[in-house]
Image: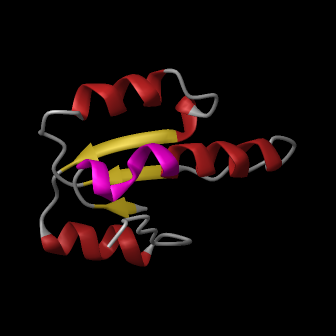
Amino acid sequence: VYVGNWKPWKRVPDLIAAFELVDAACANQKVRPKLILAGRHNYNHSDDIASRIQSSTAKEYIQVLGEWNRSQLNSLIAGSIALVNPSEY
């Protein structure tokens, strides 16, 4: 799970690339991991990231949720394998 916006310093395209490696490594598994992107995605480069997701080799395992409230996010994170934060900061 990634929770945040899609601003350039958040490195969402790098996260997608890393997830593609994980997905390829799990290709023969019965259960495949998913990358869930939650948070606000409305800024200038959102279309670039949406296009990156659509061209991803793992696009069927990437889910974009948008903005959720804190209670929903807590449940989402608690039920996840990992919380990732690829930000430059």
Read off the magenta span: 6-14
Q: Between residues 23 and 76, which one lies in front from this camera angle?
A: 23
Whether residue 64 is in magenta: the answer is no
Q: Which x, y percent locates residue 47?
A: 25, 25
Q: Which x, y percent locates residue 25?
A: 81, 49
Residue ID at (61%, 51%)? 18
Asked which colour scheme the image uses, the reply is secondary structure
Quadrant (top left, top right, bottom left, bottom right) of the N terminus: bottom left
Where 70 sits versus 66, above or below? Answer: below
Whether residue 11 is in magenta: the answer is yes
Tell me where residue 78 sits by quadrant: bottom left
Q: Between residues 22 and 43, which one lies in front from this camera angle?
A: 43
Where 7 sits versus 50, above or below? Answer: below
So how many labels did they put on this image? 0
Residue ID at (12%, 65%)? 69
Residue ID at (49%, 69%)? 80
Quadrant (top left, top right, bottom left, bottom right) of the C terminus: bottom left
Where 86 sits versus 26, above or below? Answer: below
